[in-house]
Amino acid sequence: MMAIAGAIPTAALIDAACLPVTGNRILGRDFALADPRFSVLPASLTIGFAPAPGTRRTFASSELQRIARANGIPVRNFDDICFELPMIHPSEAEVAVAMRRALPANATLRIVEMAGFDVPAGVLEFPLAGLETPGPLNHGVQLWRGTVTYAETRRLTFWARVEISVPFLAVVPDKDLPQGVPIEAGSLRVEARTGPLEHDKAATRIAEVQGRLPRRAVKAGSAIPLAILADAPTVRKGDPVTVEVESGRARLLFEAVAEASACDGEIVALRNPASGKTFKARLEAGSTALLVIAGRFGQ
């Protein structure tokens, strides 16, 4: 995080038409700074809520007299008092520092464009979740939405368009990979690349990809995102499965046929070829042994 608020000299506070307030509420100490007659108020006493960014909260003379009477302050003539949030426009250097807190150390960054509006002085952050994936027509430029946290808990969006490049290793197929077909290690290679920062982490080792099934087709030469890979099932529909049934000390073994694909630990539907009935059991480690969890076994 990066603080973009600077210290405001006391003289500037006193001479300003409106006094700056940096918290969620206008407190007794803020009133004391505006008019020393309010210095008897508890410093943490809440007088009102802070204004919205770019607006003012004005306390008219009549309202000030009411506040004074309620707190035992001799009623006198008061001039209107107003408060506002300090507003600034973040510099490109400040934005870059905030962004680099979220980026890998080896990333290159160029800010192409920034929001043109002022924001309240506060803490500027650019989480990676706010970085959009670059579109095919954007030439690598990405929109990055950040936030300014101000007045303790309030937030305002601030955006910039950036070019980000990072070096990375990626597993790349030599040929198109069809959806749902196990990936063979012989069709893969590892390449050193440089490109935009992606939300989906790419596989960096062949062992992360070999034998797994892509949930969507992958073009030859493309990095393979880990998020699209699924483990190959231990058994597929139609495969024979050895079923082990336990009931107390009794144990029964027989062959069944898988009615669907499944991985170790999953519940799978099985068909007893002798009776034609189906039942469900949990697929155990070893790819063929099953522990039947139903009370009847379809025999």
Image (cartoon, helix red, strand yellow):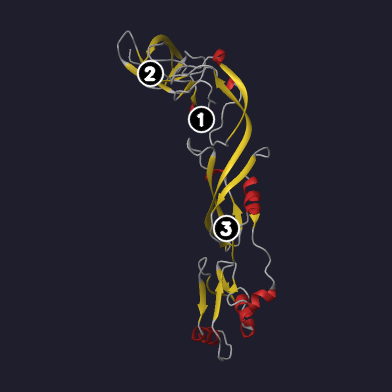
Image spot of residue 105 (x, y percent): 68, 40
Q: Is any part of residue 1 visible from this angle?
A: no
Image spot of residue 167 (x, y percent): 64, 32
Image spot of residue 231 (x, y percent): 49, 22
Dot 3: what SS? strand
Q: Earlier in the sequence, mark 3 or mark 1?
A: 3
Task: Please tell me which residue is depicted at 48% across the width and 37% down the height of the picture.
Answer: 135
Image spot of residue 44 (x, y percent): 61, 73
Q: Which dot marks residue 260?
A: 2
Local crowd at mark 2 within 10 Å, few (<14), some, or many (≥20)? some
**Which residue in the protein does label 3 denote?**
149
Q: Which of 288 and 174 is in front in this view?
A: 174
Amino acid type at circle 2 is Ala
Dot 2: what SS? loop
Local crowd at mark 3 within 10 Å, few (<14), some, or many (≥20)? many
Distance between the alpha carbons at the discs numbered 1 and 2:
23 Å
The residue lying furthest to the left in this view is 276
